[in-house]
Structure formats: structure tokens, C-alpha cells
């Protein structure tokens, strides 16, 4: 099941710089997209989301961009901080209350 | 801030034994979910539950699995006869009335 793909297994950035995490999807029925952050031995923590009727959503240092025609979304973190080091998952849903389909995750490491 | 809680944090069981994983969703949430993550793989949807019924289940959720909301607070996942391949992190999640699901810390199930 490759409906949601995160092609970069890992990303390393310097503190203060921008982190860009990417996600592609194939199912055109998805209409809501979410980013989760996960630390080892913890559950996924909801970060930010975007509806398919928007192309951008901001929350503090986090911005999610959606390009529906390309079936691509990205998460920008500016400025990156060492505490942002974690695994980031994108997820998609086709219905409210419906199941989430996850990508494989990207390990972000922010160096001081 | 309200959280989803799960017990136990780690369960070791022998192949063929029954296990019950427990979750307490956030109190005003109406929709409940179980997901699992086998080591090194994606987070996978197992089942969703609403109004005391299963609303959706995946192919993974076969007759060996069942869910129950035995009282007003707990939500359980039972595996009747565990197999080695059931070893995974099991996450419970809940949502009030939206796409955004909130996850518990997980139960690590090890089947020997």
C-alpha cells in the first residue's frame, strides 16, 4: 500500500535553518492531510493539518503547503530547533472520522 | 491537557495466548481507533469504532481481533490467539468530531 509516500528516510539541518519535509500521495479521494511528530517510545503527536480546499496552513514555526495537482504536500519548519529532532509522518484521510493512511516517516535531525 | 492513555506499556506473551490491550480515550471524544506499527514499517490502520460499533476495519483485522468499549471510559483490543507476526507497537487514537486524531503512547506487544 503506497498511497502515501515519504521518499526521504532522513533529513539533517542546522539549527536556525529551514527544514522541508515532503510527502506524495496517489489517492485523489484524500481530502485532508495531517503531519504528526513522533519521538521514540511515544505515540504520534498531531502537529498541523490542511484541508484540500486550501493550499497553505500556518501555525507558528510550522507551515504546510498542498499542491493538489501534483498530489504533493510539504511541511516547512522555520527556524529549526534541536527539539524538533524526531520522526515526522504525513497522513491522509478521505472522510471525516475516517482512517488515516500514513507515510513511512522521515527522521529529522537538527544539529546545534 | 487531556491525553489518550494506554496500558500496559509493554506486554510479552507466548504464541497462541490471548492478550487484551487497554486504552482510555479522551473523555469527550466519540470516535476511537486502533493502529499498529511493526518495527521498521508504517503505522497501519486496524479498526475504527463509533457508537459501540465497528465503523471500518482493515484486512489485518481478522477474526482473531476484536474491540470493545466495556464501560464509558475504556476501549480494548483483544487478540485471541497471538502469532509471532502480531509483535508490534499498538496505538489507540480518538477524535471528537474531526479529522485530527490524537494518539496514545502505545503498547509494545512482543510475542515469543
Image: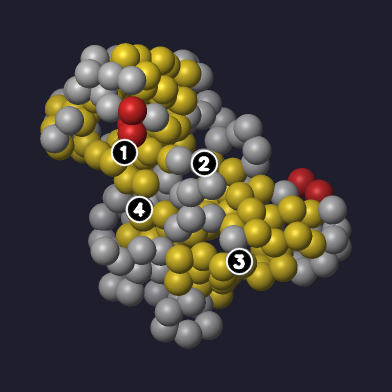
Q: Chain of mark 2?
A: A
Q: Quadrant of the N terminus of chain A?
A: top right
- Image coords of residue B20 (percent x, y): 66, 70
Q: Secondary structure at mark 2?
A: loop
- Image coords of residue B26 (percent x, y): 35, 68
Between the C-alphas of marks 1 and 4, the distance is 9 Å
| Residue at 63% over, 32% down | B40
- Image coords of residue B103 (percent x, y): 42, 54
| Residue at 28% over, 73% down | B28
Which mark identifies residue A40?
A: 2
Q: Quadrant of the C terminus of chain A?
A: top left
Task: Let me know if residue A46 appears in the view.
Answer: yes
Between the C-alphas of marks 2 and 3, the distance is 17 Å
Q: Which residue is mark 3?
A: B8
Q: Secondary structure at mark 1?
A: strand
Q: Chain of mark 3?
A: B
Between the C-alphas of marks 4 and 3, the distance is 21 Å
Q: Which residue is mark 1?
A: A34
Which mark identifies residue B101?
A: 4
Describe residue B5's horizontal placement relative to residue A36 as left or right.
right
Q: Secondary structure at mark 4?
A: loop
The image quadrant of residue A92 is top left
Work out whether A21 lies above or below A87.
above
Describe residue A102's horizontal placement relative to residue B108 as left or right.
left
| Residue at 45% over, 40% down | A39
Query: Looking at this view, is B56 or B34 the one in front?
Result: B34
Work out whether B15 lies above or below A43.
below
Query: Looking at this view, is B40 or A91 the one in front?
Result: B40
- Image coords of residue A102 (percent x, y): 46, 36
Q: Residues within 10 Å of mark 1 (few under 14, many from 20)?
A: many
Amino acid at each position: 500500500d503506497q498511497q502515501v509516500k515519504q521518499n526521504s528516510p532522513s533529513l539533517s539541518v542546522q539549527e536556525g535553518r529551514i527544514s522541508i519535509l515532503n510527502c506524495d500521495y496517489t489517492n485523489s479521494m484524500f481530502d485532508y492531510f495531517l503531519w504528526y511528530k513522533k519521538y521514540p517510545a511515544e505515540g504520534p503527536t498531531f502537529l498541523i493539518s490542511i484541508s484540500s480546499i486550501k493550499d497553505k496552513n500556518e501555525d507558528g514555526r510550522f507551515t504546510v503547503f498542498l499542491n493538489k495537482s501534483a498530489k504533493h504536500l510539504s511541511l516547512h519548519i522555520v527556524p529549526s530547533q534541536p527539539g524538533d529532532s524526531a520522526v515526522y509522518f504525513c497522513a491522509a484521510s478521505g472522510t471525516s472520522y475516517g482512517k488515516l493512511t500514513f507515510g513511512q516517516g522521515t527522521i529529522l535531525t537538527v544539529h546545534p | 491537557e487531556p491525553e489518550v492513555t494506554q496500558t500496559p506499556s509493554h506486554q510479552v506473551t507466548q504464541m497462541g495466548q490471548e492478550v487484551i490491550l487497554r486504552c482510555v480515550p479522551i473523555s469527550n471524544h466519540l470516535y476511537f481507533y486502533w493502529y499498529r506499527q511493526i518495527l521498521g514499517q508504517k503505522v497501519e490502520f486496524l479498526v475504527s469504532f463509533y457508537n459501540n460499533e465497528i465503523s471500518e476495519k482493515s484486512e489485518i483485522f481478522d477474526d482473531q481481533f476484536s474491540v470493545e468499549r466495556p464501560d464509558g471510559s475504556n476501549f480494548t483490543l483483544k487478540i485471541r490467539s497471538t502469532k509471532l507476526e502480531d509483535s508490534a507497537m499498538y496505538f489507540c487514537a480518538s477524535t471528537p468530531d474531526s479529522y485530527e486524531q490524537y494518539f496514545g503512547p502505545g503498547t509494545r506487544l512482543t510475542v515469543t
